[in-house]
Image (cartoon, rainbow, N blue to C red):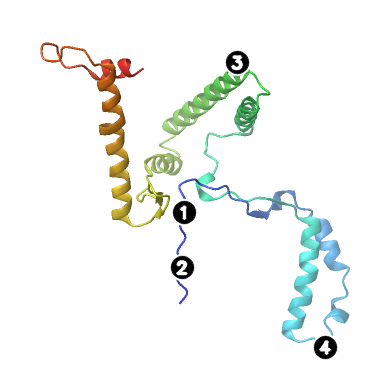
Amino acid sequence: MVEFKILRAVRRACSKLTALDFSRADFGLFRDLLGRIPWDKALEGRGAQDSWLIFKGHLLQAQERCIPTKRKSSKNTKRPPWMNKELLGKVKQKKEAYRGWKQGQVAWEKYRETARAARDQVRKAKALIEISLARDVKDNKKSFYRYVSEKRRTRENVGPLWNETGDLVTQDMEKAEVLNDFFASVFTGKCLSHTAQVTEGRDWENAEPPTIGEIRFENI
């Protein structure tokens, strides 16, 4: 038995695996290349293993010439049902505009306009697919419940975390301690001390307790 563990970091890496794109394959040329090979002479006097290696070599050579490859998308990057080719181009334009803005090649106003246009198109596409699923639920129940189940899907486990010393934490108790320390420092450390400095001088004994909005406003 082979036992191994895969430790996933917090930052998700993009998959660089490739797969065969049979939709753009030239099967006519594929059959022609394999048909030109004199198999009787090529496999004459060969055993099963040698014959298989010879056939596999010719097959892979023809496959490399006739079947292009494409980047394989994992399950987590599966295209949603509302994503079409036009909308995919809008999202790509938004990413390119963001990359150009970060590099100083695109103005902020142009990037904001592109991002708003892409966001509006995504919202409209989501609304249309949900309306069509709700309208056709009696005739197409599988698509409706599949869409609902994907929306209800949640992560049952928290991935590995880095603690304050930079070590990777994988055990549940250790991850709970890291999260507790983080939220404790956020809500009881810097925020309250900063608020106390800003609001110093107020007569808290005679005044009403501040609301969350007041605390946020004073922090700003």
Determine which quarter of the picture holds residue 191. Answer: top left
Q: Is residue 117 left or right of residue 137?
A: right
Residue corresponding to mark 4? 45
Label 1 with label 4: CB-CB less than 8 Å? no
Instruction: Tell me the kind of residue under disc 4.
Output: Gly
Instruction: Tell me the kind of residue under disc 2.
Output: Phe
Tell me how far mark 1 sits from mark 4, CA to CA: 51 Å
Residue corresponding to mark 3? 109
The residue sitting at 85% across, 64% down in the picture is: 33
For the residue carrying disc 1, how many other residues have a C-alpha within 10 Å: few (<14), some (14-19), or many (20+)? Answer: few
Residue corresponding to mark 2? 4
User: 219 or 148, which is in the foreground?
Assistant: 219
**Spot occupied by residue 141 in the image (x, y as percentages of width and height):** 42, 41
**Spot occupied by residue 174 in the image (x, y as percentages of width and height):** 31, 54
The quadrant in which the N terminus is found is: bottom left
Tell me how far mark 3 sits from mark 4, CA to CA: 73 Å
Tell me which numbered mark, 2 or 3, is placed earlier along the sequence: 2
User: 170 or 158, which is in the foreground?
Assistant: 170
Residue corresponding to mark 1? 8
Tell me how far mark 1 sits from mark 2, CA to CA: 13 Å
Q: In the figure, 132 relative to 167: above or below?
A: above
Label 2 with label 3: CB-CB less than 8 Å? no
Observer-side mark, 3 or 4, equals 3
Instruction: Tell me the kind of residue under disc 1.
Output: Arg
Tell me how far mark 1 sits from mark 3, CA to CA: 37 Å
Tell me which numbered mark, 2 or 4, is placed earlier along the sequence: 2
The secondary element bearing badge 3 is classed as helix
Instruction: Tell me the kind of residue under disc 3.
Output: Glu
Tell me how far mark 2 sits from mark 4, CA to CA: 43 Å
